[in-house]
Image: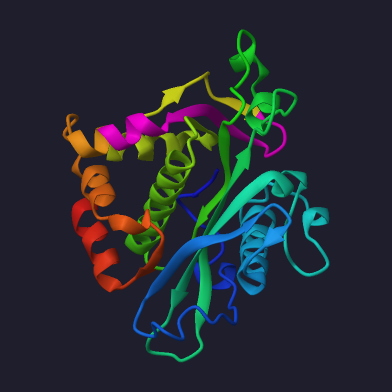
Amino acid sequence: MTVPINAPVSAEKLTPLIETTFFQLRPEASFWLGHIASGEEVHCQAERHGAGVLRANVYIDESRYLPESARQPDGTEYDADDARADHLVVIENNTIMPNSRHVVGTTRLIHKRDDDDVLPIESMFPEAFSEEAAPTGSLEASRYIARHPHRPTQNAIALALVRAMTIRGHNQGHDYIYGVVEDHLMHQFEKIGLPFAALGEPKKVERYNTLNVPLRFDLAEILQTAAADTIGKRTMSLFFQSSGANGGQGYFDRTFIDRIEKISA
């Protein structure tokens, strides 16, 4: 998972332009967030390809977590875990410039399908699971990316992905989402009051050549905390309360972004 603070490459160059039909019926909408694929079952080809290009641009070109050899001939980045993952994407619709739609966020939820399955976090941090493996049915969030030239909007996109993953996982009956995150991202989660359990100390993960921390998110606890607002952190509570019946997915206009900018200030 990564949402770097200082992007060495401009967000405009990182976010791919795609052709999508999602805004034909809602041309006034500024964003669409939704589920585009489950493993090899791809519901939205153009959007799936755009998410893969964004991943390559961020993980290979910007952050240099992966080598150039990880880029596919079509400009995307995929790996073996994609075949057991649900994929979400955020598309921005420029309402001023026709046909200007960019993929500005993406993430995936890797499924632990049975006891023989091993999540990436279990391989990278085996010491955190020495006594007990991650339960079957657990999820791991990875390739968590939000990019936008306007920083508050980027933060709102990142929060929208967190909310959508939480509600989606909970509604499907999952208990936990795991994640391998950079230290600064963990502190961002603390700042907004997102509850989690750190399963170990930061260490350098050779796969990404950076310091990371293994985290576990209890989905029921997140939703209960957001509803109760017992910790005095209003950003997360107000954000989750605005999810409505759509589970945090669907169309959003500028008021969605403006609301998050205000409560994040």
Give residue 223's position: percent from left, percent from top: 31, 37
Q: Nearer the viewer, residue 101 or 224?
A: 224
Residue pictured at 53% horizontal, 46% vertical: 2
Give residue 115's position: percent from left, percent from top: 70, 23
Give residue 166's position: percent from left, percent from top: 42, 43
Establish if 194 lies above or below 5: above
Residue pictured at 68% horizontal, 37% vertical: 209
Left or right side of 206 for 163: left
- Image quarter in which the N terminus is found: top right
Establish if 59 lies above or below 177: below
Give residue 46's position: percent from left, percent from top: 65, 74
Residue pictured at 67% horizontal, 31% vertical: 119
Left or right side of 151 for 45: right
Left or right side of 117 for 167: left
Residue pictured at 46% horizontal, 91% vertical: 98
In magenta stretch: residue 104 = no
Q: Write down the quadrant of residue 112 in the picture.
A: top right
Q: Write down the quadrant of residue 126 in the picture.
A: top right
Extent of the magenta region: 205-224
